[in-house]
Image (tube, grey):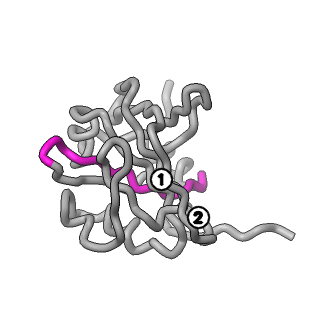
Amino acid sequence: MAVEVDLFKAGMRRLAGHVCIITTAAADGTRNGLTATAVSSVTVSPPTLLCCINRSASAFETVKETHRFVVNVMPESEREIASRFASGDSGEARFTTGSWMTLATGAPVLTTALVAFDCRVSDIAEVGSHGVFFGEVQALHISDGVDRPLLYLQGAYGGFSELS
């Protein structure tokens, strides 16, 4: 028997996660995106990662239809952008701040991301309320900055500090 949803959520809130912005662009160039922590590497040959997107997210159908997305790993200095992509706004309204460019797939890349993985969808698994998108990395952009990663734990943003 599975645990109750609220108990599962309480447990997951204690799992620190890196904050990413998943971005995509429709065939007409309209951009969309969301904040996510459910991102993981899958394999290095071919370079593949996965991201999990709720079916109710405004970007879900665009990723599913265009087969492209970018995982932008957020630095601490871009907390405001991470919050904007987690807010009630959607589509182009989320792109009013930040410096954006494109790489191989044409999906939006945040130039200040610690690293941005530009992916072509190679497979999709639908599980419960989410789609698990497997993305083969077509290109990547590594920021020149030395900012620390933005983290998420128990409903709040935080940062990383080394233990001595």
Q: Amino acid at mark 1?
A: Ala
Q: Is residue 64 above or below residue 85?
A: above
Residue at position x 24%, y 53% in the image? 32
Quadrant in which residue 126 is drawn: top left
Quadrant in which residue 68 is drawn: top left
Density class for disc 2 (Cα within 10 Å; few <14, some 14-19, many ≥20) is many
Where's residue 72, x and y in %?
45, 55
Question: Tag 1, which secondary structure?
Answer: strand
Residue at position x 38%, y 56% in the image? 109
Q: Which residues are magenta?
A: 15-28
- Residues at discs 2 and 1 in contact (Cβ within 8 Å): no
Residue in the foreground of this view, choosing between 118 and 74: 118
> Which label is found at residue 101?
none
Where's residue 31, x and y in %?
22, 54
Residue at position x 40%, y 56% in the image? 21
Pointer 1 residue: 116
Quadrant of the snapshot with the C terminus:
bottom right
Residue in the foreground of this view, choosing between 7 and 40: 40
Distance in Å between CA atoms under marks 2 and 1 = 13 Å
Residue at position x 60%, y 56% in the image? 16
Residue in the foreground of this view, choosing between 60 and 122: 122
Residue at the far right: name it.
Answer: 164
> Which label is found at residue 149?
2
| In-image side of 26 versus 110 (left or right) | left
| In-image side of 65 versus 105 (left or right) | left
